[in-house]
Amino acid sequence: MIRLLLLLVVFLASPASAWARSVISAEEALARGEAAIGRALPDLELVDSDGRPFRLAEFAGRPLLVSFVYTGCSTVCPALVQNLYPAVKEAQRLFGAEGFATLTIGFDARNDRPERLRSFARAQGVDLPNWRFATADQPTIDALAETLGFAYWPSAGGFDHLALVSVIDREGRIYRQIYGGVFATPQIVEPLKDIVFGRERSLLSLPALVDRIRWFCTVYDPRADRYAFSYAFFFGLLAGGATLAGAGLWMLREWLRRAGSVRAP
């Protein structure tokens, strides 16, 4: 994993901010990302690719995928978005377009203006609802990057940075970190499934029980690269129940037979 991270960095941008000026190793970048798990997302104000300001609090109550790019990149950043696209599309098919949101942040505040982010998204073919591209001033970007454990630093002519997608839960806390610029669909969908279907939720209500059943029964088919609802769980329950019932009836019949033999003169 560490060696992979060394390959998954991005080049060709402008100088970074004071917070990100020091070069760090891949091991330190990974440790920074892992240390962020459990932190709460700050309610910062950003500007989307249409020039409209919004606050991160708008995403409260549903899962959120957060990634970082910069528009001056022509290699890994476009690939990261393009590889994330099919996983997000499948997750939207599974959970609905309103079931979660995706946010890609341009961290080069000096150059990643709304119009450039808009062109970048269009060039990568991003046409899905609830996928926003946004930026902010450099202090805001740095505060968000530090919270999320996203590391970036200047290199010759540009930036190196950790290739990272952060999964934020309904309460606005970092639930999981996904590293690398190539994503298998389950890497993105499984943590979202945990949050949407509430794997950690108490089973004291019917909706929670239904969601837990959906969590068990929604399975990935690697041949089709799709998720589907599987009835195998129910068939297993029925088969197990039938076996237990049959064993119980047999035991009851044997007990009655022996009890009758004892009472006979």
Image (spheres, grey):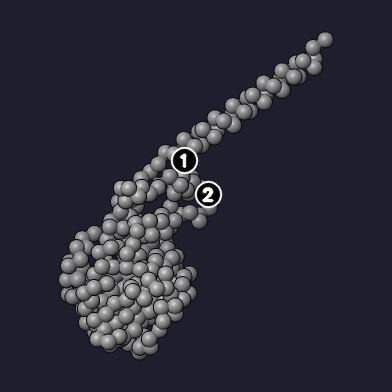
Q: Which label is found at residue 171?
A: none
Name the amino acid type tagged 2: Leu
Give the CA distance from mark 2 to mark 1.
18 Å
* Residue 114 placement (x, y as % from top left): 20, 75
Helix, strand or loop for disc 2: loop
* Residue 153 placement (x, y as % from top left): 34, 84
Rendered-image quadrant of the C terminus? top right
In the rendered view, would you say 157 is above or below 100? below
Decide if residue 98 is in sight here. Answer: no
Sequence-wise, the earlier of marks 2 and 1 is 2
Say whether residue 234 is left or right of residue 222: right
Q: Residue furthest front?
A: 3
* Residue 263 placement (x, y as % from top left): 80, 15
Q: Which label is found at residue 233?
A: 1
Q: Which label is found at residue 203?
A: 2
Residue 51: name its quadrant.
bottom left
Write the residue at 42% across / 59% down: 191
Name the amino acid type tagged 1: Phe
Write the residue at 41% across / 81% down: 25
